Image (cartoon, rainbow, N blue to C red):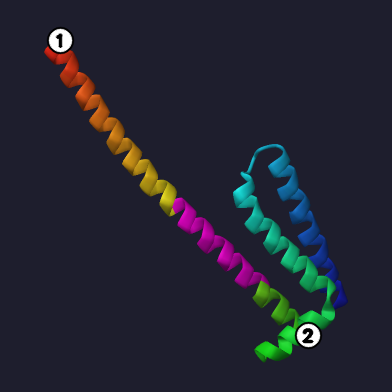
Amino acid sequence: MDRLLNVTAVLSAIMLIMVLISVRRAHIRVEYSVTWLLGAAAMLVLSRCRGVLDHLRVWTGLPDTPLTLFLLGAGVLLVLFFRFSVIISHLRDDNIALAQRLAILEYHMETIQKHEQ
C-alpha cells in the first residue's frame, strides 16, 4: 500500500512540474492549467495523507484504500475531461459563428466591389 501511495505521489509531483513548465513556456494557457494543477495537487495530498484517504474510504463505504485512491483519481479525471469538453464545445460554436461572420463580410465586400465597377 505504501509503495502505491509513493508511486502516486511521485506521478502527481511530476504532473505538477510538467504543468508548471508548460505554463512557463506558454504551451498551455493559465486558465486551463488551473484544473490540471488542482487535480494533481489533490492526488498528491491524498497520496501523502493516509488518514484523509482512510476517512474517505470509510465515508464512501469502499472496502480498500487503494481502490478509494484510484476511484477518486478517476473522478478527478472525469471532471477534467468534462470541463475540457465544455470548453471545446464553446470554442467550436465560436469558430462556426466566426466563419459565418467572415462569410457575410466577404459577401458584402464582393457586393461593394461589383457596384463600384
Magenta stretch, main secondary structure class: helix
Q: Which residue is disc 2 drawn over?
A: 54
Residue 115 horizontal/vertical position (percent): 12, 14
Instruction: Tell me if 8 is positioned left or right of 34 in this view.
Output: right
Q: Which of marks 1 and 2 precedes in the sequence?
A: 2
Query: On residue 18, which mark appears?
Result: none
Image quarter of the C terminus: top left
Task: Let me know if residue 13 appears in the view.
Answer: yes
Mark 2 Cα within 10 Å, few/some/many (few <14, many 20+)? some
| Residue drawn 72% across the image and 86% down it | 57
User: Is residue 42 placed above or below 109 in the rendered structure?
Assistant: below
Label 1 crowd bin: few (<14), some (14–19), many (20+), radius 10 Å: few
- Callout 1, which amino acid? Glu
Q: Which residues are magenta?
A: 73-88
Residue at 78 percent across and 85 percent down: it is 54
Check whether the beta carbons of the residues at disc 2 and disc 1 lie within 8 A of each other: no
Disc 2 to disc 1, C-alpha distance: 77 Å
Residue 116, which numbered label? 1
Q: Position of residue 51 (x, y in %)?
A: 83, 82
Residue 9: image location, x then y, percent: 81, 65
Report the amino acid beneath label 2: Asp
- Locate residue 110 relative to residue 67 in the image: left or right: left
Q: Is residue 71 magenta?
A: no
Is any atom of residue 64 visible in this view? no
Residue 13 in percent (x, y) is at 80, 58
For label 1, the SS is helix
Q: How many marks?
A: 2
Q: Name the outermost residue toward the top.
A: 117
Q: Is residue 86 above or below residue 108?
A: below
Q: Quadrant of the N terminus?
A: bottom right
Label 2 element class: helix
Judge from the rendering whether residue 77 lies leftward or rightward of residue 83; answer left or right: right
